[in-house]
Image (cartoon, grey):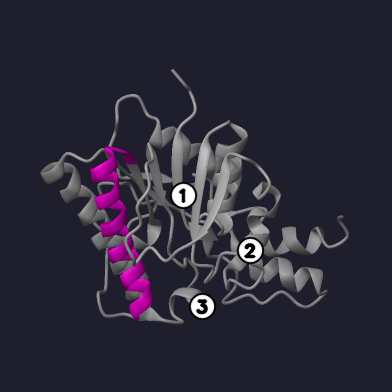
Amino acid sequence: TPTFKRILVTGGAGFLGSNLCRRLVNEGNEVICLDNFFTGSKLNVEDLMGKPNFELIRHDVTEPFRAEVDQIYNLACPASPPHYQYNTIKTLKTSFLGALNMLGLAKRCRATILQTSTSEVYGDPEVTPQCESYWGNVNPVGVRSCYDEGKRVAETLFREYRTQEGVDTRIVRIFNTYGPGMHPYDGRVISNFVMQALAEEDITLYGDGSQTRSFCYVDDQVEGLIRMMNSPDGHPGPINIGNPHEFTILQLAELCIGGRGLG
């Protein structure tokens, strides 16, 4: 029996998706990468294009998609505020309809499906750090709600397809991730600081820089996704994936300034 799997990755030409595709292809799996290229780019998967076990398809997950696959990683959704606020209704449709369409595919194929949810489902948390049992402090009518609430309802869809339809679902909640393939202008703090440092501009701090964040390197994030997908006990989640160690925004700025002369 073959050890490789047929794997669908939605949002596979994005930052996290392209790193996941690369790992899965290098492990010998047959990988179908779906992306509508709103925030993803063919350049992110350029090195995979000639490989016989990699296929790139332009497709929007708000439309149904049919294929025969063993596993589905559902990553499709713009994840940074400038991108998901560009077309808020489209962001909601991507989260909801994308999850619905991929769950339907998983049901037909009897595939295992993993949803990349987000720490944003906790809203503006009153508890730090957030554990998976925390329900959050949320606002359904805020400026970020198109992303937060879309991800929350996608989690609900995954739960209901598991309990009602018997689909093998997994949910992970992703915290801040960084590494090769990040969009340079995605509006998030690491991208902003690195771009300012490379341009030898002053680093923009909001407040005194004492706010804390945790940042997970993308290879570790990918490892977490793959382990969750293949967990022998079939744990449905949700499971938080991130770096448990926090440091301040000021420390991050100092690291970026200190790295200006590198490379």
The front one of 97 and 125 is 97
- Report the amino acid beneath label 1: Val
| Quadrant where the image shows the C terminus | bottom right
Residue 234, percent from left and from top? 29, 30
Residue denoted by label 1: 9
Q: How dense is the environment of label 3, judged by Cα within 10 Å: few (below 14), some, or many (20 and up)? A: few
- Report the amino acid beneath label 2: Ile
Circle 3: element type: helix
- From mark 3 to mark 1, how far is it between C-alphas? 23 Å
**Which quadrant of the view contains residue 109?**
top left
Circle 1: element type: strand
Residue denoted by label 3: 82
The front one of 179 and 52 is 52
Residue 256, percent from left and from top? 74, 62
Asked if the residue under mark 1 is in contact with the one under mark 3, i.e. CB atoms within 8 Å, the reply is no
Residue found at the far top of this picture:
1
Q: Which residues are magenta?
A: 89-112
